[in-house]
Image (tube, rainbow, N blue to C red):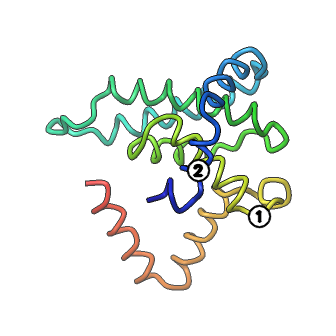
Amino acid sequence: VWLLCSGALDRLARNRGYYSRLVLRAIANVPRSVVYEFDGDIQLWKTTENSKLSGNDISRSSDCIKVEAIVMKRIIMAFYERTSYIGYCPCFVPLIGSLLKKMGEEASFWILVQIVERILPDDYFTTTLSACVDQFLLFDLLSKLDAPLSNHIRELEAKHKE
């Protein structure tokens, strides 16, 4: 549904091979300092994902999370190569992680492109704090203004993670 509604399906169909070429260019062009930055965020994501695994969970394993992290790095590098004017934002890591649980690598890349280039305002990453900070501030404010609603959201998050 996201692919269709966001317009990513159309971009994917019209740009066959673009993502693969972009990944290859990114490997050569993305500065090592930038790669180190998102490597740290991916490592943190892996640790968090591994901590969610239970002894009975056979749907995802530590090895699966390692593969997702490798794929995530390719998506981030390709996206950075495409949109270096935006730079890297740590909130891309959990977003891409969520997308990869639902769809493949190239589809996840095009959804990210659509969200950042078409859905969010043009100045979102240059004049506001960032999507991550916005989300934390909103949740903090909500917990202060409407504790019952805040608790309900936490309960829904816990159920969703099960």
Foreground residue, 111 or 49?
A: 111
**Residue found at x 60% / y 33%:** 16
Q: CA distance from mark 2 to mark 1?
A: 21 Å
Q: Which residue is mark 1?
A: 121
Q: Which residue is mark 2?
A: 10
**Residue found at x 27% / y 62%:** 159
Kind of residue at disc 1? Pro
The residue at the far left in this view is 56
Q: Quadrant of residue 79?
A: top right
Q: Quadrant of residue 141?
A: bottom right
Q: Earlier in the sequence, mark 2 or mark 1?
A: 2
- Quarter that holds the C terminus: bottom left
On residue 130, the disc is none
**Residue found at x 48% / y 57%:** 2
Dot 2: few (<14), some (14–19), or many (≥20) neighbours within 10 Å? few
Q: Secondary structure at mark 1?
A: loop
Q: Nearer the viewer, mark 2 or mark 1?
A: 2
Kind of residue at disc 2? Asp
Q: Name the spot of residue 3 as percent of width and height, x first.
A: 50, 53
Q: Are marks 2 and 1 in contact (CB under 8 Å)?
A: no
Q: Name the spot of residue 119 as percent of width and height, x first.
A: 68, 62
Dot 1: few (<14), some (14–19), or many (≥20) neighbours within 10 Å? few
- Quarter that holds the N terminus: bottom left
Q: Secondary structure at mark 2?
A: helix
Q: Is residue 30 above or below residue 104?
A: above
Instruction: Say left or right for 149 vs 60.
Output: right
Instruction: Say left or right for 9 vs 147.
Output: right
**Residue found at x 61% / y 27%:** 17
Q: Name the spot of residue 71 as percent of width and height, x first.
A: 50, 28
